[in-house]
């Protein structure tokens, strides 16, 4: 099977048999298997690509910016994991990476589409958001109280997680911009909003629970004379 990135979303967002609920916010009824024999397709050489329902749009389309930046977020999380996080946080963020592919699949298919399988496509649900909230609630008590805004830095792990957090915020902004022009699943927007919170918490955890945070000192870089 020859697929491009958007076409891969098209393949993955088709429902297949199966009705199990994964332990962490997973979608019911989707157990895709995929075989990719060749990466390049030449289909996008003229600057267009396919949405999840098969519609051809410009690669500069708001929808492409939205789910493309979601993909960037997942990649940045992968870099953070590769810096060497503890096993618990690694496991959590691996599941988040999987969720982000679901978010991208959701955003790649317009809510009102009548093409292909239409509204039977994979969608993010409130359960995904609740899982992130539960993770935030579990991890937050392990942190030192905040006494100032923090700068992105400290350990390499924390710096990488802060970078992932800012990319996630950018993905959210692109998704909001898309939502102002076309309907977007509210749960997908909420997921990105909650994920940036989780990544902030994770970054502080990687800075010895916040004890090694680099604090913002308002005006601190200004010297007399």
Image (cartoon, rainbow, N blue to C red):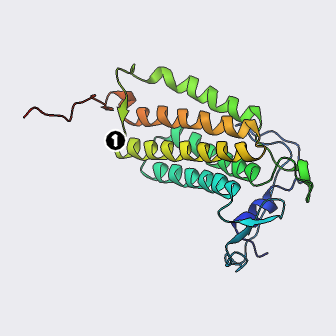
**Rendered image quadrant of residue 188:** top right
Residue 34 screen position, x and y as percent: 77, 65
Q: Find numbered disc 1 in the image and state the secondary structure of the residue it sits on.
A: loop
Residue at 75%, 55% in the rendered image: 108
**Residue 17 visible to the viewer:** no
Which residue is at a point 57% across and 23% down the rendered structure image? 137
Residue visible at 83% across and 47% down in the picture: 111
Q: Nearer the viewer, residue 113 or 8?
A: 113
Q: Within 10 angstroms of label 1, few (less than 14), some, or many (20 or more) residues? A: many
Q: Is residue 165 left or right of residue 207?
A: right
Count of number-bearing discs? 1
State whether residue 68 is above or below residue 81. Answer: below
Percent from the top left, x then y, of residue 146?
A: 39, 21
- Residue 97's spot in the image, x, y percent? 61, 48
Residue 36 in the image: x percent, y percent?
A: 73, 72
Identify the residue shown where x is 73% and y is 50%.
107
Between 8 and 21, the one nearer to me in the picture: 8
The residue wearing badge 1 is 153
**Quadrant where the C terminus lies?**
top left
Q: Is residue 128 visible?
A: yes
Q: Quadrant of the N terminus?
A: bottom right
Q: Report the front residue among 188 and 223.
A: 223
Location of residue 117 by image quarter = bottom right
């Amino acid at each position: 099977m020859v697929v491009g990135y958007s076409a891969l979303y098209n393949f993955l967002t088709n429902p297949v048999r199966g009705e199990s609920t994964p332990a962490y916010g997973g979608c019911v009824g989707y157990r895709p298997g995929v075989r990719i024999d060749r990466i390049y397709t030449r289909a996008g050489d003229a600057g267009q690509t396919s949405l999840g329902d098969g519609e051809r749009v410009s690669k500069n389309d708001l929808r492409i910016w939205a789910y493309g930046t979601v993909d960037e977020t997942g990649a940045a999380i992968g870099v953070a994991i590769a810096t060497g996080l503890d096993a618990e946080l690694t496991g959590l963020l691996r599941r988040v990476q999987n969720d982000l592919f679901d978010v991208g699949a959701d955003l790649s298919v317009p809510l009102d589409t009548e093409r292909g399988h239409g509204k039977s496509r994979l969608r993010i649900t409130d359960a995904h958001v609740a899982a992130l909230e539960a993770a935030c609630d579990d991890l937050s008590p392990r942190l030192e109280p905040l006494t100032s805004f923090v700068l992105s830095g400290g350990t390499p792990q924390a710096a990488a997680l802060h970078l992932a957090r800012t990319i996630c915020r950018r993905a959210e902004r692109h998704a909001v911009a898309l939502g102002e022009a076309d309907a977007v699943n509210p749960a997908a927007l909420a997921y990105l909003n909650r994920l940036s919170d989780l990544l902030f918490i994770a970054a502080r955890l990687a800075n010895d629970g916040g004890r090694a945070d680099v604090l913002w000192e308002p005006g601190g870089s200004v010297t007399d004379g």
